Structures are given as structure tokens and as C-alpha cells.
Image (cartoon, rainbow, N blue to C red):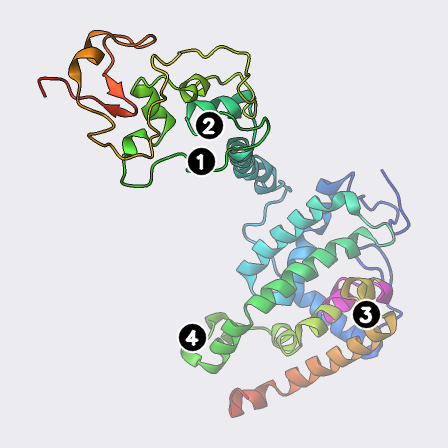
Amino acid sequence: MLKGVGLSEGEPHPAADFELLYERFRLPMYRFVRGMVLDAEAAEELTRRAFDRAYAARARFAENLSPAAWLYGFGVQVSMSHLRRGRLGRLLRRWHPATRDPDEEGRSGVEVALEALTPSLRAVALLGLYAHLSSEEIGSILGISAESVGSRLHAATEVMTTALSGGRQAEVTGPR
Amino acid sequence: MTDQTTGRTDRSILGREEVLWAEIIRCEVDSWRPRRLPARFRPGPRPRRAPVWGGLPLVAAACLVLLTVATFANVSTGVGGVLHHLGGIRPLPVPGSKSGQPPAGDHGHRPAAGSGGAASSARTSKAAGLPSPHIARVGTASEPRTAAPSPSAPAPVPLPSPPPPPPPTMAPSPVAVPPLPTPISSNPPEGLSAGEPQTVGAYPVPSPGQ
């Protein structure tokens, strides 16, 4: 098995063991993408798309990253694209209760907290708090410095805490 | 704490509140399971088929461009040249013109529109059986287009009479072309078969019965 700077012991190399990489990261990638888009069905298609992109780019694997960080980069790409395309639809659903997604009513506290974040803060939160990537890896994926990652992670947790504590108050006052 | 996803420990950037949130998120998110995501990775078939189907329009466009270039280019050999000559759109060299010079204009020696259009092209001249240097040039696809007629080469069909036929630009006149049916119809000139229509100049001579 090929080993690079970002490869730890036992980690599959994308170019040599992509199927093993898929088996290992299939569920984490799906959960990360679902946390980003907050849509179960779309997350499956986007996860498939992210792995397709990674497979096509497996020969250009940058070995200064870990395979996990490299893969999550594709997850961030497809999720951000999906969120940009669906921004108008979500706004309409938010302001017109008749067209609101019925799943929104049964959302958990984590989903409500994640929804309160902007997509970029959501990516920082999920990459740091769920995928447990390092600040350097997160900064490399998102194109920001490692110092910015720490401050954005702190900001994200504050927003999520506020969203959870103020959720009941928001239900009383309605959408802002 | 050891990360189960990447096998690495990286909690240096997390404070106390972040660690708490990490546990909350992990407990919630780990319960999400896909319904139709395949367990084994299969590369999508679309990227493999794309070069095959995507290349066909490219090849067709390239063939079209090549055919267009071969048709309109000034080539005298090859398929393009043969098609060019078979199409009858080869410009006729003007007798007496210098070698290599194009004719003064394809329409320079042709009648104006509406004044005897039957003689306005080399095809109609050949069909009318007119013994003319123009006819000798038409259909010799193997010769270079810009070659001037050789002065030493004998004329393929000499004219029976010294005065040349009236140029096709002249309007038919009863004085210039008297309707004399007998001498022309009895003895066709050399190079003219008996079955071909009789003409004077570029104009068919009506038979006596007409």
C-alpha cells in the first residue's frame, strides 16, 4: 500500500485502495453531507456524487492531506453546490408555511442547531466536531487559515447554543 | 479521545463547549443511515461512455469541415478536384490569355441575362455541339486548371469556315444568321455527329418541319 505524508498506518490510499476507502468512509461521508444539506434523500445522491468525483481525481491525491480530509473536501464541494442551488427554494418554504417541508416539524435539536449556521460555519462545525479534522486540514479544504478555523468553530458553537436555547421562543414569535 | 473515523486524535482546537457539542453531534449524526447508498463502490458508467458518445459529433464536425475545405479550396487533384470538375463549375480559360492568369471574369464573354441564356455556360455549348476551343477545355480534368492552351497543339475541331462564329453575346439576327436549312442539314461539319442538333453559333437551327 502506498504511503504518503498524510497517510497514517492502516489508511487506504485513494489511488490504490479506493474501494476500501469507500467502505470505510461511506457512512461518515453520508452523515457529513446530510448534516450539511439537512436532507436525507439529497444526501445519498450527493454522497454518491462526491465519491464519483473523488474516484475521478484519485490519481491527483495530494499526499499532504489525509485520505479523510481529501474525501471530505469533495463532500464540502457537492454540499455547497447543492445549498447554493436550493437557496431560493428554502427561502420560499420558510416564508410560506403551506409549502414547508413536513420533515422540518420533526427535526432534532442537532438539526435545528445546524440549520441555524451558515453553510461555511456548518462545514467548519461538522469537519471539526464530527470528522475531527485538524485546523490545518479544515483550512486547506475551505481555503482559510488555521487560525480562522479556531475562531469560526467557536462562533459556530455559540450560534448553535443560541439556536437551541432560543428555539422555543422562535416558535412563539414565528419566522423572522 | 480517539477519533473512530480517521483514527487520529485532534482535540487541541476544541474547548470545553466544543467538546460537548462534538459529543452531541456524534450521538445524533451516527444514527443517520442511508437507505439506498450501495455498500460497494461502483464507478459511474457515465464518465466511461462520455468519450465514446461525445466523440461522435466531434468526428462528424471534423469530417464536415474537411469536406467543406476540400470543396471550396483551389485544388485540382484528389477527390475534391474530381468532384470540382465533374460539377462543371470549373472556370474556363479564355483563349489567348496568358498562362497562370485567371479569366477576366467568368461572365465577361457571356451574354447578358435574358439575351440568349442557352449559350451562357460551357455545358450548353457542349450540348449544342459547337466546335469551339472552349469545348476542348471542358472535361479535361487531368490538366492543370491554369494551363493556357498550347499554341503548338492542333485544334481538336477546326472550324469549317474562316469567319469565326458570332460571339454568344450577339443577339440572334436574321441578317447574320440567315435561315438556310439545306447546306447545314445535309453535311454536318467534322466532329459533329448526324444525330446531334444542328446549330449555328450557339443557337439551334430549326429543322424545316418546325
Q: Nearer the viewer, residue B38 or A72?
A: A72
Label 3: which residue? A144
Residue depth check, mark 2 versus mark 4: number of the one nearer the observer: 2
**Is disc 2 in the same subunit as disc 1?**
yes
Disc 1: host chain: B
Secondary structure beneath dot 3 equals loop
**Is disc 3 in the same subunit as disc 2?**
no
* Any part of residue A91 in sight: yes
Question: Which amino acid lies under the numbered mark 3 shown in the image of this protein?
Answer: Ile
- How many marks can you see? 4
Question: Which amino acid lies under the numbered mark 2 shown in the image of this protein?
Answer: Leu
Tag 2 near tag 1, CB within 8 Å: yes
Residue A86 falls left or right of residue B162:
right
Q: 10 Å neighbourhood of mark 2: few (<14), some, or many (≥20)? A: many
Q: Which label belongs to residue A99?
A: 4
* Residue range corresponding to the magenta coloring: A125-136
Between the residue at mark 1 and the residue at mark 3, the CA separation in whole angstroms equals 71 Å
**Which residue is pictured at 75% across the width and 65% down the height?**
A127
Secondary structure beneath dot 4 equals helix
**Which residue is pictured at 65% across the width and 65% down the height?**
A80
Label 2: which residue? B92
Question: Which amino acid lies under the numbered mark 4 shown in the image of this protein?
Answer: Thr
